[in-house]
């Protein structure tokens, strides 16, 4: 019997004792609700509760006769509003003017996006709601503001959608290295050499912009930490990436661009300093700015 199983047994035995002693003390049954995390259609602790030992048989007899197991499907729009009202009270000391309820309907819409609600249940999970709110509140606190703005909530929601299936590779810090184009990502010849020359010119212009920006920012970012998108796996389908003939990818956090090449079928954004130059990025590139998925823009 492993440690987790021992711990579960200890907890259940404690609950059994509480219900028994409560009935003796108050002369009526004491009802308790056991909340456990589960996934799919599995019933947490069911293997333990189904054991033939007399202790577990006694425990099972204390379950509700008709509905022994219940599932919380998620939160409706009204419940989201109630949760936001509670969070306003919890964070009132830090944000005296906090008013999350005014965005309740919008937050519900964002968090029932198909990426976050793939079964179209129309319910919001507490995990996604808390992630979005706490991210927005952290940004608000750093900005020394007393109330969260809609723009921050929207950015937090977009971050959840964009990074929902993003895999971050944790490795030692290293220099930013430009990865050369492979044959799979080099521009194909269409309509003779004219189209190939246009593509080469576009790439040269983009590389020139990157080089100038890197030179301008070198003194400003030499001591600053790497951007948070460093070494993050970019969730672009490899076939879409190869078919597009566009190898330049824009960092969704700081807008810095890099030429990427798949390594073992994976696109990884190299370590880089946050881009501080406000020059607009106009070259043809893969971008996720203001979107819920990566797409080719510019050019």
Image: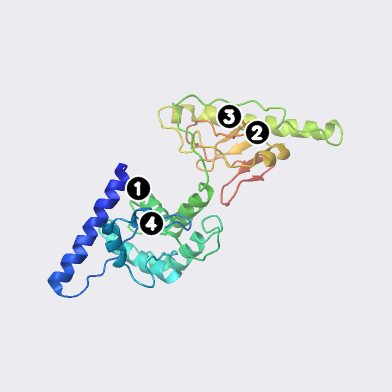
Q: Residue at x 29, y 42 (%)?
A: 3
Q: Indicate which label's residue lies in the foreground, 2 or 3.
A: 2
Crowding near the residue tagged with mark 1, few <14, some 14–19, many ≥20 C-alpha atoms within 10 Å:
few
Q: Report which quarter residue 64 is drawn in.
A: bottom left
Please tell me which of labels 1 and 2 falls first in the chain: 1
* Colour scheme employed for the rendering of this structure: rainbow
Report the Cα–Cα distance between label 4 and label 2: 59 Å
Residue tagged by mark 4?
46
Secondary structure of residue under mark 1: helix
Give whichever of discs 1 and 4 has the lower sequence position. 4
- Assess disc 3: are there few (<14), some (14-19) or many (≥20) residues with their C-alpha within 10 Å of its C-alpha: few
Where is residue 181, by image quadrant?
top right
User: Which-is-in-front pick, marks 4 and 3?
Assistant: 4
First along the sequence among labels 4 and 2: 4
Residue corresponding to mark 2: 206
Q: Is residue 72 above or below residue 168?
A: below
- Of residues 22 and 273, the one drawn nearer to the viewer in this rendering: 22
Give the residue at mark 3.
212
Disc 3 to disc 1: CB gap under 8 Å:
no
Left or right: where 18 falls relative to 48? left
Q: How far apart are marks 3 and 1 (CA)?
A: 31 Å
């Amino acid at each position: 019997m492993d440690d987790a199983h021992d711990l579960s047994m200890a907890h259940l035995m404690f609950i059994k004792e509480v219900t028994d002693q409560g009935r003796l003390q108050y002369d009526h049954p004491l009802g308790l609700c056991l909340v456990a995390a589960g996934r799919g259609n599995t019933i947490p602790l069911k293997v333990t509760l189904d054991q033939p030992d007399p202790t577990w048989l006694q425990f099972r007899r204390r379950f509700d006769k008709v509905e022994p197991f219940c599932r919380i499907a998620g939160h409706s729009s009204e419940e989201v509003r109630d949760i936001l009202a509670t969070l306003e009270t919890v964070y009132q000391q830090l944000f005296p003017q906090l008013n999350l309820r005014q965005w309740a309907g919008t937050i519900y819409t964002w968090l029932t996006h198909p990426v976050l609600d793939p079964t179209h249940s129309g319910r919001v999970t507490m995990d996604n709601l808390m992630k979005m709110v706490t991210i927005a509140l952290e940004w608000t606190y750093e900005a020394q503001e007393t109330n969260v703005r809609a723009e921050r909530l929207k950015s937090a929601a977009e971050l959840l959608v964009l990074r929902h299936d993003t895999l971050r590779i944790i490795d030692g810090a290293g220099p930013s290295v430009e990865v050369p184009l492979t044959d799979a990502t080099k521009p194909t010849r269409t309509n003779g050499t004219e189209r190939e020359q246009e593509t080469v010119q576009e790439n040269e212009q983009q590389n020139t912009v990157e080089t100038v920006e890197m030179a301008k920012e070198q003194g400003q970012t030499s001591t600053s930490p790497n951007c948070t998108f460093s070494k993050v796996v970019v969730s672009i389908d490899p076939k879409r990436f190869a078919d597009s003939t566009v190898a330049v990818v824009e960092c969704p956090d700081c807008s810095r661009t890099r030429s990427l090449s798949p390594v073992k079928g994976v696109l990884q954004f190299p370590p880089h300093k946050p881009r501080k130059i406000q020059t607009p990025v106009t070259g043809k590139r893969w971008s996720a700015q203001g979107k819920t998925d990566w797409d080719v823009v510019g050019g």
